[in-house]
Amino acid sequence: MTLPQLIVLNREVTAAALPALLPQACTVSTCLREVRIASVPVEEQPAPAEVLAAGYDLHTGAAAYRFLLQLACGLESEIAGETEILGQIKQAWRDCEAAQPGVARGLRPWMQRLLQDTKEIRSEFVVGLGSATYGSLVRRLLGGTLPGPTLLLGAGQLAETILPFLDTGEVLVWNRSQSRAQEMLARQRSAQVAGRVHLLDSGIDAEAAAWRRAHDVVICIPADAARDAQRAQWWQ
């Protein structure tokens, strides 16, 4: 694999149904972004216009590796230097090696170098930036032990990361897919977390009642102007 063949597509997660490019790629999916990493001959790489139409930012060659380093070091995250993205990249790479050995074979030298370079950069330069995870940041912003109840909206990766950090007597979890919320709770390793969490019905009445009861609210779902205005009224 040569450097010009390295290509990275990055786009924010949106509600729009946009086409996915580079199916033969290592894909890192987070609550905020989708990143596709591939080794593709220059003449076979998607055209910039096609990439733009699909909502991606295009990075190739040295710029692609630079972006991956910034991403893995948490410098592309909302919290500068957060550590969770590195774990997500490692998991995506393990999944790629298991499911797409051909893709992994071409990417392996760059992914191995990326993980090593990231380790060195983090240990030497990315230090002292405050809370290292979204969960620890939420706990710090909310002020430690909470009187409760705390309403957690969502059941995606972000909500799952934050849930163990909510030090409160009662946590109310609402998500439009109750089955997905049940799966999130089932993955919690701490019995103490599961014991103080109440999973709410996915209906609007249950959500409205929870907003009216909540002392604090942690929102881990996309913005929705109409619904958010209604939620603000409920909380008042």
Image (cartoon, helix red, strand yellow):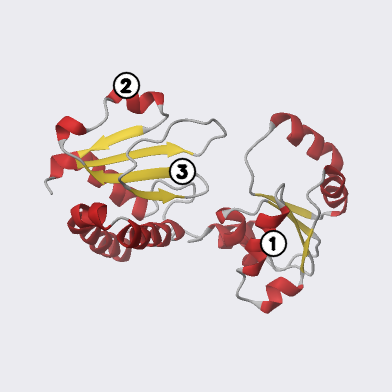
Q: Secondary structure at mark 2?
A: helix
Q: Position of residue 47 (x, y in %)?
A: 26, 25
Q: Nearer the viewer, residue 79 or 93?
A: 93
Q: Nearer the viewer, residue 177 or 117?
A: 177
Residue 49 - label? 2
Residue annotated with mark 1:
182
Crowding at label 2, few (<14), some or many (≥20) Cα neighbours within 10 Å? few
- Mark pair 1, 3: CA separation: 24 Å
Question: In the rendered structure, are the residues bearing label 2 and label 1 in contact, judged by CB atoms less than 8 Å apart?
Answer: no
Q: Residue at x 54, y 30 (%)?
A: 16
Q: Position of residue 77 (x, y in %)?
A: 45, 48
The C terminus lies in which quarter of the figure? top right
- Note whether residue 140 is visible: no
Q: Residue at x 69, y 72 (%)?
A: 193
Q: Earlier in the sequence, mark 1 or mark 3?
A: 3
Q: Residue at x 43, y 31 (%)?
A: 19
- Given this view, does label 1 or label 3 mark the residue nearer the observer? 1
Amino acid at the residue labelled 1: Gln
Question: Does 76 sit left or right of 155 as displayed?
Answer: left
- Mark pair 2, 1: CA separation: 41 Å
- Given this view, does label 2 or label 3 mark the residue nearer the observer? 2
Residue annotated with mark 3:
33
Residue placed farthest to the bottom in the image?
A: 191
Q: Residue at x 13, y 49 (%)?
A: 1
Instruction: Note whether 196 is above or below 131 in the view shown.
Output: below
Q: Position of residue 186 (x, y in %)?
A: 65, 68
Question: Does 214 sit left or right of 49 as displayed?
Answer: right
Instruction: Note whether 119 is above or below 106 in the view shown.
Output: below
Q: Earlier in the sequence, mark 2 or mark 1?
A: 2
